[in-house]
C-alpha cells in the first residue's frame, strides 16, 4: 500500500503507551491512528490560539 506519510520512531514510557493503546481500542482506532489523531488535535489547538503555522515544503520532506 503506497502512502505519502513519513514514518517516525517515538519513545514512550511503558505506562503511557499502554494507556494510549487502551484509548485507541476504545475509539476503535489503531495505535498509529490514535497517535495521529492526538497530534492533529494538538496542532489544531495550537493554531486556534496562535494562528496558522505556515508550511515550508523545503523543510517538510527532509530526511
Image: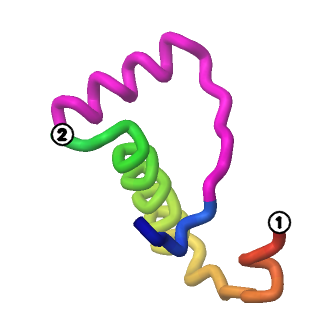
SS at badge 2: loop
What is the quadrant of residue 34 in the picture?
A: top left
Report x, y in % for residue 42. 48, 56
31 relative position to 25: left or right: right
- Principal SS element in the magenta part? helix
Q: Is the residue 52 above or below the residue 48 in the image? A: below
36 relative position to 22: left or right: right
Of residues 29 and 50, the one nearer the viewer is 29
Quarter of the figure with the N terminus: bottom left
Q: How many marks?
A: 2
Q: Which residues are magenta?
A: 7-27
Mark sitting earlier along the chain (2/1): 2
Residue 45 forms part of the magenta stretch: no
Residue at numbered disc 2: 27
Taking the spot 31% from the left edge, 41% from the top edge, the residue there is 30
* Residue sitting at the far front: 1
Of residues 58 and 49, the one nearer the viewer is 58
Q: Is the residue 53 above or below the residue 17 in the image? A: below
Report x, y in % for residue 28. 17, 40
Taking the spot 38% from the left edge, 20% from the top edge, the residue there is 19
Way the structure is coloured: rainbow
SS at badge 1: loop
**Mark number, residue 3:** none
Residue at numbered disc 1: 63
Residue 11 forms part of the magenta stretch: yes
Label 2 environment density (alpha carbons within 10 Å; few <14, some 14–19, many ≥20): few
* Separation of marks 2 and 1 at Cα, in angstroms: 32 Å
Q: Is the residue 60 above or below the residue 38 in the image? A: below
Taking the spot 48% from the left edge, 70% from the top edge, the residue there is 3
Taking the spot 22% from the left edge, 30% from the top edge, the residue there is 25
Amino acid at each position: 500500500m503506497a502512502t505519502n506519510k513519513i514514518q517516525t520512531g517515538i519513545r514512550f514510557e511503558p505506562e503511557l503507551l499502554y494507556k494510549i493503546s487502551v484509548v485507541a481500542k476504545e475509539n476503535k482506532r489503531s495505535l498509529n491512528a490514535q497517535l495521529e489523531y492526538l497530534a492533529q488535535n494538538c496542532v489544531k489547538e495550537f493554531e486556534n490560539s496562535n494562528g496558522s503555522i505556515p508550511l515550508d515544503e523545503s523543510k517538510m520532506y527532509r530526511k
